[in-house]
Image (cartoon, helix red, strand yellow):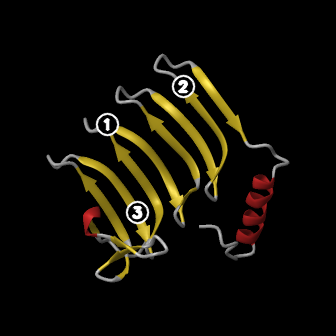
Amino acid sequence: MTDDTRLDAEQLAFDDDGRALHAGAPFTGVAVERDDDGALLAEDTYVDGLRHGPSRMFHPTGELAEEGVRRRGAWHGTVEVWNVDGTQAEEARYAYGICLESFTWDASGELVEHFQLDQESDMMRLVERCRADDEQGGDAGVA
């Protein structure tokens, strides 16, 4: 990201395609959301109007609630979610916005749900097409 702009998320408008705009142009920078008392609730990095880069949400008490990276608007990589007490509630791995695997724990730390994308599914074939296109320097059209 070449722009160091940091502004309040309320200053953004969104076009019909969902791109974030500031002063009529696609926004590049970090948008922050705060509660009425000024406590940080969220930070999202944008490039050319799309969430692209680190994304964080915070509990009203200030503890980190969710953290991950978005690529062209979609989750890409590991996304983690924490309870207000700091214990992990969820972890998921994404590629091009498609969940490859996720884990969910209850408040006592017991694993209560595990999901893994079927390696033979149409969604996995889409992920593989996107990966192949990336390796060739292309854009498979996945946000």
- The image quadrant that residue 103 belongs to is top right
Is residue 69 depicted above or below 131 in this figure?
above
Q: Earlier in the sequence, mark 1 or mark 2?
A: 1
Report the side of 99 relative to 109 (left or right): right
Q: Amino acid at mark 2?
A: Trp
Image x and y of residue 65, in percent: 39, 39
Extreme residue in the right direction:
120
Q: Residues within 10 Å of mark 1 (few under 14, many from 20)?
A: some
C-alpha distance separating marks 2 and 3: 28 Å
Q: Residue at point 48% right, 16% down?
A: 108
x 59%, y 51%: residue: 77
**Dot placed on the residue nearer the N-terminal end, 1 or 3:** 3
Residue lying furthest bottom:
24
Q: Tell me the residue that label 3 is attached to.
A: 45
> Residue 133, how many percent across, how many down?
74, 71
Q: CA distance from mark 1 to mark 2?
A: 18 Å
* Image coords of residue 115 (percent x, y): 68, 35
Q: Secondary structure at mark 1?
A: loop
For marks 1 and 3, give the CA distance. Answer: 19 Å
The residue type indicated by label 1 comes to Glu
Q: Which mark is residue 102?
A: none
Q: Are discs 1 and 3 less than 8 Å apart at CB?
A: no
For discs 1 and 2, the disc positioned in front in the rendered view = 2
The residue located at (46%, 75%) in the rendering is 16
Residue assigned mark 2: 105
Q: Residue at x 51, y 22 (%)?
A: 106
Image coords of residue 59 (percent x, y): 31, 38
State the SS at label 2.
strand
Q: Which residue is mark 1?
A: 63
Residue lying at the far left in this picture: please name it: 37
Secondary structure of the residue carrying tag 3 is strand
